């Protein structure tokens, strides 16, 4: 998995509305990439609902979240609408898992991403990363807030 100090690998993915999103688009702000296995799975649903609840506080701290999975942009749109969330969802759909592989969080055996978080600073450098030890483990919001506090103190 990519680690602190590494340059964030470039990517070009479609969001749930079909818009292209690149690493360059994220520059100038702190970004948190939220890698999750699949839309509509129970644990992923819970994870994104938790992050949606704290999204205003994260945005107040200058952090922009983007969910990433191997589902298509169309599936992301249906998932976003079903949950009523506003977190942008990026489709690492074709070639499947290409971007996730660059970040070291693609699970080749399952054909999905691992459940992982990658914080990228405004210059495009990874400042923090975390990978759950199990697909059933949701990285809690406190973990994200602690990482943001640690980055501000550094």
Image (spheres, rainbow, N blue to C red):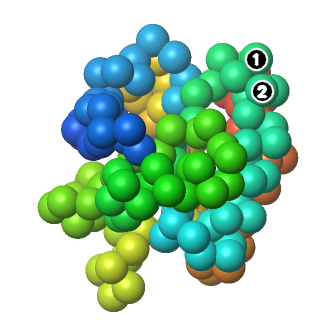
- Please report the residue visible at 63 percent of the width from the left and 57 percent of the height from the top: 82
Report whether residue 84 is seen: yes
Q: Is residue 29 above or below residue 3?
A: above
Q: Quadrant of residue 104?
A: bottom left
Q: Label 1: state its secondary structure.
A: helix
Q: Where in the figure is residue 18, as x and y percent of width and height?
A: 30, 39
Q: Quadrant of residue 24?
A: top left
**Residue 109 bears which disc, if any?**
none
Q: Label 2: state its secondary structure.
A: helix
Crowdedness near tag 2: few (<14), some (14–19) or many (≥20) residues, C-alpha within 10 Å: few
Q: Quadrant of residue 44?
A: bottom right
- Please report the residue visible at 58 percent of the width from the left and 28 percent of the height from the top: 64
In the displayed structure, does residue 63 sit left or right of residue 31?
Answer: right
Residue that numbered label 1 is attached to: 60
Q: Where in the figure is residue 109, as x and y percent of width and height?
A: 33, 87
Nearer the observer: mark 1 or 2; the answer is 2
In the displayed structure, does residue 12 sit left or right of residue 37?
Answer: left
Report whether residue 104 is seen: no
Mark-to-mark CA distance, 1 and 2: 6 Å
Residue that numbered label 2 is attached to: 56
- Please report the residue visible at 36 percent of the width from the left and 55 percent of the height from the top: 74
| Residue toward you, 126 or 56 | 56
What count of labels does the image hold?
2
Q: Is residue 107 above or below residue 119?
A: below
In the picture as drawn, the residue positioned furthest to the left comes out as 95
- In the picture, the quarter occupied by the N terminus is bottom left
Crowdedness near tag 1: few (<14), some (14–19) or many (≥20) residues, C-alpha within 10 Å: few
């Amino acid at each position: 998995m990519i680690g602190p100090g590494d340059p964030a690998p470039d990517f070009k993915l479609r969001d749930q509305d079909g818009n292209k999103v690149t690493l360059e688009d994220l520059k100038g702000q702190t970004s948190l990439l939220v890698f999750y296995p699949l839309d509509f799975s129970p644990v992923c649903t819970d994870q994104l609902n938790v992050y949606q609840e704290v999204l205003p506080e994260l945005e107040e701290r200058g952090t922009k979240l983007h969910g990433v999975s191997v589902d298509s942009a169309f599936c992301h749109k249906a998932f976003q609408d079903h949950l009523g969330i506003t977190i942008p969802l990026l489709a690492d759909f074709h070639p499947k898992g290409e971007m996730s592989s660059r970040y070291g969080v693609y699970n080749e055996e399952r054909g999905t991403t691992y459940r992982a978080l990658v914080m990228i600073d405004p210059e495009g450098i990874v400042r923090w990363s975390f990978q759950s030890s199990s697909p059933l483990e949701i990285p809690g919001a406190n973990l994200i807030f602690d990482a943001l506090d640690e980055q501000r103190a550094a």
